Amino acid sequence: MCVFSCQALIRAVQGPPASSWLLKPLRLHSIFPQRKMSLDSGVSGMRASYRGRQDVFTEDDLAFKEPIGQFKEWFDEARNNPQILEANAMCLATSSKDGNPSARYVLLKGFGPDGFKFFTNYESRKGKELDENPKAALTFYWDVLRRSIRIEGKVSRLSEEESDDYFHSRPRESQIGACASNQSTPISGRDVLTSMEQELTAKYSDHVIPRPSHWGGYILIPHSVEFWQGQSTRLHDRIRFRLPKSSEKPDGRLLHQGDNGWVYERLAP
């Protein structure tokens, strides 16, 4: 009885013979249980209050019946708000000829009835995409005001003279930066940039810095400008100005006649 009990105990400690487990796949997760990682981190519950139910944006609140004047109205309010550091920061969305989109932030450097202007490297990704597909969208978002403006249109390059004038109005450090960077190309490290910056700073210490031929301005000529104001109920206000189709006639209910050839309409949020 004792011999049998000892043999049983040895078998229990040693486990099954090797032939019974050699051909079975080893399941590591049964030995080391995996921890489940939560990628949400509470994001789904993040929610901010916007404006009150009475603080809405209606057609009667339009200061102008065309988008450029209305843009200036909202832009001036944003730029004069001390809590907004760069009211002219805007997201520029472009697309390749194959339809692959990309977006990045740039700075608005001028606007008027002719369009919205910005400057960048012609050989950057956005520059190459605008060469292939000269259509783009701009988005401004001013969190403090709970307002956003979306602009869509065609893009073309500004004249070399206008690009020269703006380039030489920039701080010298920014002019050097434009010359030193082959934007969107891979580099081995930041020292490549600082080395080029030092070299160009020494080279042009007593000279006017010439605008590089690969750097200049663009203008987006809008065909659609949407004004958005957020509401806590998520019943946001959206009023869009656009250029009408040749067959369209404003009915005063869904489509309203604006000024300077524009029409406007309210969109569901």
Image: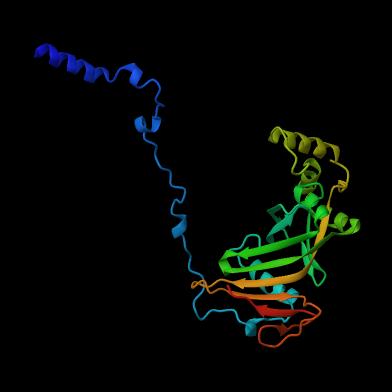
Residue furthest top as drawn: 3
Residue furthest left as drawn: 1
Find residue 165 and report its image quarter: bottom right
Residue in the foreground of this view, choosing between 242 and 249: 249
Query: In the rendered view, would you say 111 is above or below 34?
Result: below
Residue in the foreground of this view, choosing between 63 and 100: 100
Residue furthest bottom as drawn: 252
Please say whether residue 76 is visible from this viewpoint: no
- Left or right of 92, for residue 39: left
Query: In the rendered view, would you say 254 is above or below 95?
Result: below
Image point 75% across, 74% down: which residue? Answer: 68
- Left or right of 257, for residue 37: left
- Left or right of 125, for residue 27: left
Residue 100 percent location from the top left of the image: 71, 52
Image point 77% across, 68% down: which residue? Answer: 222
Question: Quick one: quadrant of the N terminus?
Answer: top left
Query: In the rendered view, would you say 179 is above or below 108?
Result: above
Q: How is the image coloured?
A: rainbow
